[in-house]
Image (tube, rainbow, N blue to C red):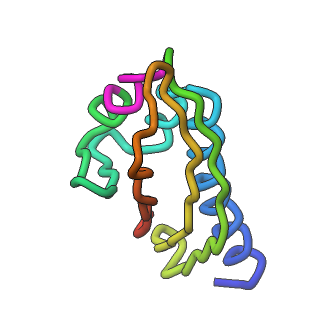
Amino acid sequence: MDALMRLTIEAECQRLIYSFAYGQDHGQADVMAALFTVDGALDRPGGTIQGRDRICAHFSRHIDRLLMRNVVSNVVVTVIDENHATGSAYFVAYRHVAGETVGEELPRPSFFGGIA
């Protein structure tokens, strides 16, 4: 594989990560889910969500009451071959669900990693 092909694959994979964050920021659960294959999986705190339809349903739960903004950094994509790559990124998510109040204990930050 030549350098241009490797860079193209890296850029396409990075775009997937940023598109996921953009979709979440704008309440587009269907757009987020479309980034996954039909049998794709999302590993996140609390477990794995399996399947595009379940991923969409998960992110649709509070869509009408959720205000969220993501800051994405440390995006690293490793190209294995023309059809395979692995990657990871840090997500800092600022979120507010209408009607929720924050008590004395603030929510703990979540780590989203292992995006492949």
For the residue pair 35 and 83, the one nearer the viewer reads as 35
Decide if residue 43 is on the left or right side of residue 34.
left
Instruction: Reply above or below: 96 against 85.
Output: above
Please give the name of the residue rendered at 40% of the width and 31% of the height, measured from the top-left corner.
59
Residue range in magenta is 57-63
Q: Position of residue 83 (x, y in %)?
A: 48, 67
For the residue pair 6 and 108, the one nearer the viewer reads as 108
Decide if residue 80 is on the left or right side of residue 6.
left
Is residue 101 a member of the stretch shown in magenta?
no
Q: Could you tell me which quadrant the C terminus lies in?
A: bottom left
Decide if residue 63 is on the left or right side of residue 55.
right
Please give the name of the residue rendered at 73% of the width and 75% of the height, measured from the top-left corner.
7
Snapshot quadrant of residue 58 = top left
Across the whole image, how many numbered discs are drawn on residues?
0
For the residue pair 103 and 54, the one nearer the viewer reads as 103
Instruction: Reply above or below: 16 against 56.
Output: below
Please give the name of the residue rendered at 36% of the width and 23% of the height, measured from the top-left corner.
61
Q: Position of residue 93 (x, y in %)?
A: 56, 50
Name the residue furthest right: 4
Is residue 59 a member of the stretch shown in magenta?
yes
Please give the name of the residue rendered at 55% of the width and 68% of the height, measured from the top-left corner.
89
Q: Could you tell me which quadrant the N terminus lies in?
A: bottom right
Name the residue furthest front: 104
Q: Position of residue 51 (x, y in %)?
A: 26, 40
Instruction: Reply above or below: 25 against 77.
Output: above
